[in-house]
Amino acid sequence: MNARFIASNLKEAEEELRGLITRLESGEQVSFEDYHVAMAHIYHHLNSAWNGRNATDEQWRECIDEDYQKWQKFPQDLPMIGDDDYYDLPEYDAKT
């Protein structure tokens, strides 16, 4: 896995999430449009961290449109907690 690529995307998501939480907790009236933009930005980076986890540094630097489109989509190979296939990922070697 490309730890630098993953960390970079997670930091971007964290920054946006922290900013959104700060705005909400301060009592600011966040418009739907601002909320939508923030959530889309967060998901873009979370999805990219997962989908692009095996990207090479060159792929990351070049970031062709095909990779960008593939990385930002909601993961199709990420079972959610509680799903029957949660532990079926090949990289998951925990005993259940």
Image (cartoon, grey):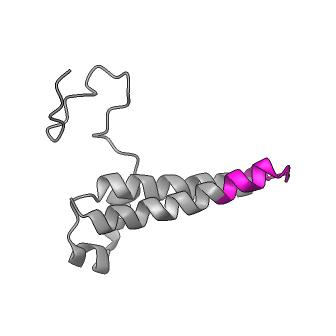
Stretch of the chain drawn in magenta: 19-32
Query: Height in image: 51 above or below 56?
Result: above
Q: Position of residue 40 (x, y in %)?
A: 56, 54
Quadrant location of the C terminus?
A: top left
Residue at 31%, 68% (x, y): give it. 4
Q: Is residue 36 left or right of residue 50?
A: right
Residue at 31%, 41% (x, y): give it. 76
Residue at 69%, 51% (x, y): give it. 21
Q: Residue furthest front?
A: 95
Q: How many marks?
A: 0
Is residue 28 located in the magenta-colored stretch of the structure?
yes
Q: Is residue 21 left or right of residue 44?
A: right
Query: Height in image: 33 above or below 91?
Result: below
Query: Height in image: 58 above or below 48?
Result: below
Is residue 24 located in the magenta-colored stretch of the structure?
yes
Residue at 37%, 63% (x, y): give it. 7
Q: Position of residue 55 (x, y in %)?
A: 23, 65
Quadrant location of the N terminus?
A: bottom left
Q: Position of residue 79 (x, y in %)?
A: 32, 32
Residue 68 placement: quadrant: bottom left
Q: Is residue 83 left or right of residue 12?
A: left
